[in-house]
Amino acid sequence: MLISITFKPRTNSNVLEYFMTSLVLEHIHFRTHLLHIYM
């Protein structure tokens, strides 16, 4: 991802927050993708 290259967190909490956000976004993207398949 381009974001992971440009985004450079300084603290562990920022790292965790970033990974959680990206995981949630990936999950949403995956669900919408499945939704389009079944529609």
Image: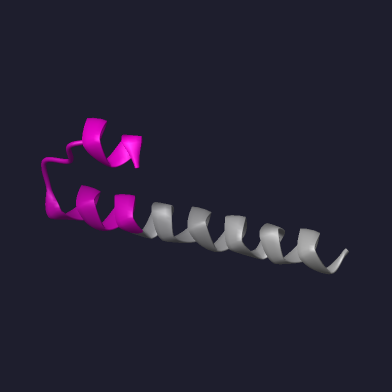
- Coloring scheme of the render? one colour
Count of numbered circles in the view: 0
Residue 36: which quarter of the image? bottom right
Q: Nearer the viewer, residue 19 or 14?
A: 19
37 left or right of 14 in image: right
Q: Residue at x 60, y 55 (%)?
A: 29
Place of residue 10 in the rendered image (x, y in percent of width and height, measured from the top left): 11, 41
Q: Residue furthest right?
A: 39
Instruction: Name the residue rendered at 66%, 64% in the picture.
Output: 31
The region drawn magenta spans: 1-19
Which quadrant of the figure contains the N terminus?
top left
> Measured from the top left, where is residue 19 in percent x and y?
32, 56
Q: Position of residue 6 (x, y in %)?
A: 24, 30
User: In the image, is 39 to the left or to the right of 24?
Assistant: right
Q: Residue furthest front?
A: 37
What predominant SS class does the magenta segment belong to? helix
> Image point 17% across, 37% down: which residue?
8
Q: Is residue 34 left or right of residue 29?
A: right
Side (left or right) of 28 relative to 10: right
Q: In the displayed structure, would residue 36 be above or below residue 8?
A: below
Quadrant the C terminus occupies: bottom right
Would you say residue 31 sits in the magenta stretch?
no
